[in-house]
Amino acid sequence: MQEQSLIGAFEAPPQDAARAFRAALEALARPGTIHEIKGGQAPAPVSEAAASLLLTLCDPETPLCLMGRHDTPEIRDWIAFQIGAPIVGPESAMFALGTWTALQPITNFLIGTPEYPDRSTTLIVEMEALSQDGATLAGPGIKETATLALPDIEPFQMNHALFPLGVDFYFTAGTQIAGLPRSTRISGTQVLEATEAN
Amino acid sequence: MSDYNFAYLDEQTKRMIRRAILKGIAVPGYQVPFASREMPMPYGWGTGGVQVSAACLCPEDTLKVIDQGADDTTNAVSIRKFFEKTAEIAVTEKTREATVIQTRHRIPEEPLTEGQILVYQVPIPEPLRFLEPRETETRKMHALEEYGLMHVKLYEDIAKHGHIATSYAYPVKVEDRYVMDPSPIPKFDNPKMDMAAIQLFGAGREQRIYAVPPYTKVVSLDFEDHPFDPSKANHPCDLCGAEHTYLDEVIIDDEGGRMFVCSDTDYCAERQAEGHRGRLSPSENIEKAAE
Ligand SMILES: [Zn+2]
């Protein structure tokens, strides 16, 4: 086990996790808003925001899927030591972590069942930066419309079309987080490929 | 107090509750199952709401707890003290100052704002339960959007009483999809549910969490020929003169004398402090006595 896996937990777990959860709650409850979330440090290339979100929501009860450059021995060790989540493939993941490209195709993830739409995957999409300069959002949590830079448009529209089934998204970069629940309607064609981490 | 049970619950339990809350936000009005924990208080005291609050509270929060609109009932005082002790958070009776508000049976009169969370204590989360006792069946009805029976029930009310008799826990439809129990608030409060704050609902005994994000469409079920009527009593408040609030009827003497006062005690007190007067305002009586 790498020494790196022994560090990076919250300094004051109950308080830091509570603050991180509130950021995650506000982000998902108000699509298009960007929030600070910090305190967790995982091996590169995991952002502080994604590490904090994993520490806040994941544990041995939440199968986690690591994709692309987020699936390294160092990251697996860190997850094993700090979180204890079993590492699984997309078809049984409650959470998934990776860049937008690495997470494709998102149709591999769980969308829940008509009776249990909550049995679905939450995707943590690592970005180079978060910006409100992008697609137009509407729906629950949004007064009229909001905007958010998304790495794509159509897959999110298709995901929304499955409502109340579907996956939910968090976008993370540095210490910032934004959320996009399946309930959000998306319009606009602006795709900011440059914002994706690579 | 140990850091490891900030807000009473252990970290693993809070993670499980937090995940359920986020699913509730993603699917507004859908009841997310969760593994409810024993709390050091009876179920009737809103252990579902207490667990949701415990999962949300940060050290920086200011908590308000109301029961039937009042901050000073045994239930409200106990829950407030519980979190003062276990989370060392600030508390308030002022709606405006609170970041988290736990409630039973009312929505505050003052409009809630962004950044606030309203946590409801829910006794029976399933709006279809009285029509269908089997959980497997109600789950199927929600999955298929089979809400015809609910409309039939409301229409039977109209046939029997000339109007829809349900006045508490009046069912709503959230974002044109799920029929939801708004908890036993008076139907007067239903229109307030389309609000700027996050609304979270916790049912402890029934082990369900559900949510309504800010600015979400919440429509009280009704019929074209019998539109929803939030029904407001025909009196102003006898203490602050408000004509737009939900009132409680209070017996004031042995001769059956009664008065109508705002059920939201903080709102009423603030109006009185601002100089608003009602028919039986104490200060006016004092002035009269002094004359
Ligand atoms: Zn009043």
Image: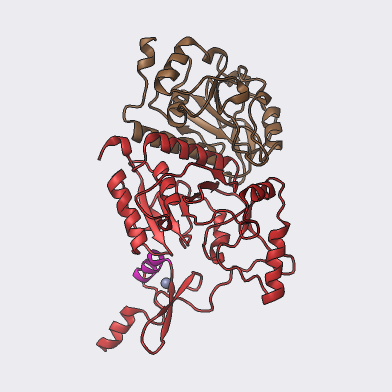
Chain colours: A brown, B red
- Who is closer to the viewer here, A168 or A65? A65
Position in image of residue A67 (x %, y %): 57, 17
Q: What's drawn in magenta, residue-wise? A: B264-273
Q: Residue furthest front?
A: B134
Position in image of residue A138 (x %, y %): 64, 41
Quadrant of the snapshot with the N terminus of chain B: top left
Query: Taking the image as drawn, is residue A30 in sight?
Result: no
Position in image of residue B85 (x %, y %): 27, 48
Up-down: is B254 above or below B6?
A: below
Query: Ligand 1, what quadrant?
Result: bottom left
Quadrant of the snapshot with the C terminus of chain B: bottom left
Taking the magenta stretch, the answer to whether it contains residue B37 is no
Give the dominant element type of the magenta stretch: helix, strand or loop: helix
Query: Taking the image as drawn, is residue A160 in sight?
Result: yes
A79 displayed left or right of B180: left
Up-down: is A122 above or below A141?
A: above
Displayed quadrant of residue B27: top right
Q: In this figure, what is the number of numbered marks?
A: 0
A163 displayed left or right of B61: right
Residue at left offset 64%, top offset 47%: B136
- Who is closer to the viewer here, B151 or A192? B151
- Who is closer to the viewer here, B203 or B263? B203
Residue at left offset 61%, top offset 28%: A150
Residue at left offset 55%, top offset 65%: B168
Position in image of residue B131 (x %, y %): 65, 59
